[in-house]
Image (tube, coloured by chain):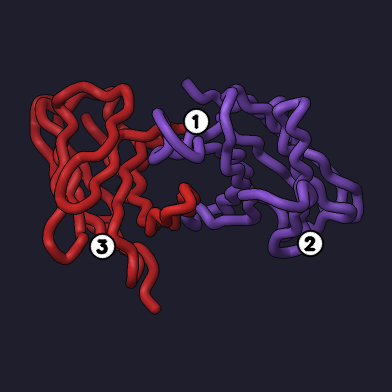
Chain colours: A red, B purple
């Protein structure tokens, strides 16, 4: 049973460029969340996708956008990169049950470095 | 809005010492609580979780945590740590309904170093 997978593993970009990160959820999961983890910090919620729509968004600017495909995989796009966008980007998948329980499984992350 | 506080930034223990990592959250409603662990070079893994029922939950590798609702706390414990427990530990919370019910809110993490 494959867990959450992310690509690429590492990425180096320069300021002003655009980047796309990819995520495949754990088998059987239909919901994908994205988190940004800066060095020495806990992950911060960017947004969550369900049924190909953004369901909830954290405190991140519009430069951060996403997409979910019919097969539940997801992309995170960041435009006009800033030095401060350098971080580990984590994808988490889940299956939101009617009970309100939301257990998320994390992928290995994509390390983005902006020069 | 939800928030999570982890009291210790870095904890250093000798092998066989007991461990307790503090976690407090702020949210007035019903919550789900989690502890995640991140071993060096590895991804976040779920250590244990609390949804409802017995407030003392047991996780993998001998870890346990106690939910004290009156104190808004979910402290992580292990009676005897091993060198292999060296990792970063994150407490996380999400609301059971309403605003914030889809996101996990994490603490800043506690780095645990176990000395052989």
What residue does disc 3 label?
A24
Q: Quadrant of the N terminus of chain A?
A: bottom left
Say few, some or many: other residues with alpha carbon within 10 Å of mark 3 (under 14 / 14 to 19 / 20 or more): many
Q: Which of the 4 image quarters holds residue B111?
A: top right
Quick check: A87 left or right of A23?
right
Q: Nearer the viewer, mark 2 or mark 1?
A: 2
- Residue lying at 71% horizontally and 25% vertically, measured from the top left: B7
Residue linked to disc 1: A41
B109 on left or right of A6: right
Q: Nearer the viewer, residue A103 or B60?
A: A103
- Residue occupying image coordinates x 62% and y 47%: B35
Q: Are marks 3 and 2 on the same chain?
A: no
Chain-order first, disc 3 or disc 1: 3
Chain to which mark 3 belongs:
A
Q: Nearer the viewer, residue B31 or B75?
A: B31
Task: Judge from the rendering whether residue A90 lies leftward or rightward of residue B95; answer left or right.
Answer: left
Pointer 2 and pointer 1 on the same chain: no
Mark 2, residues whose alpha carbon is within 10 Å: few (<14), some, or many (≥20)? Answer: few
* Label 3 SS: strand
Q: Are marks 2 and 1 in contact (CB under 8 Å)?
A: no
Callout 3–callout 2 Cβ contact below 8 Å:
no
Residue sitting at 46 percent across and 47 percent down? A100
Q: Chain of mark 1?
A: A
From the top left corner, tell me how far across and down residue B98 is, in percent. Answer: 41, 32
Q: Which residue is mark 2?
A: B62
Q: Nearer the viewer, residue B33 or A2?
A: B33
- Report whether B36 appears left or right of A111: right
User: How many angstroms separate mark 3 from mark 2 (CA)?
Assistant: 31 Å
Between B99 and A80, the one nearer to me in the picture: B99
- Please give the name of the residue rendered at 50% of the width and 40% of the height, measured from the top-left corner: B96
């Amino acid at each position: 049973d494959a867990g959450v997978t992310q690509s690429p593993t590492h990425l180096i970009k320069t300021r002003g460029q655009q980047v796309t990160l990819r995520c495949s959820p754990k088998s059987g999961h239909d919901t994908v969340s994205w988190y940004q983890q800066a060095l020495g910090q806990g992950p911060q919620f960017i947004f969550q996708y369900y049924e190909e729509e953004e369901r909830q968004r954290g405190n991140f600017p519009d430069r951060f956008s996403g997409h979910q495909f019919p097969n539940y995989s997801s992309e995170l796009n960041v435009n006009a990169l800033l030095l401060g966008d350098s971080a580990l980007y984590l994808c988490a998948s889940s299956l939101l049950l009617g009970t309100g329980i939301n257990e998320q499984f994390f992928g290995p992350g994509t390390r983005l470095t902006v020069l | 809005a939800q928030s999570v506080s982890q009291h210790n930034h870095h904890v250093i223990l000798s092998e066989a010492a007991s461990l307790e990592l503090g976690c407090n959250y702020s949210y007035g409603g019903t919550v789900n609580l989690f502890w995640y662990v991140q071993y060096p070079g590895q991804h976040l893994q779920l250590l244990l979780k609390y949804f409802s029922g017995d407030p003392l939950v047991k996780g993998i590798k001998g870890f346990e945590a106690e939910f004290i609702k009156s104190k808004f706390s979910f402290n992580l414990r292990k009676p005897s740590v091993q060198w292999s427990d060296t990792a970063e530990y994150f407490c996380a919370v999400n609301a059971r309904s309403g605003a914030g019910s889809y996101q996990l809110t994490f603490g800043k993490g506690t780095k645990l170093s176990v000395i052989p």
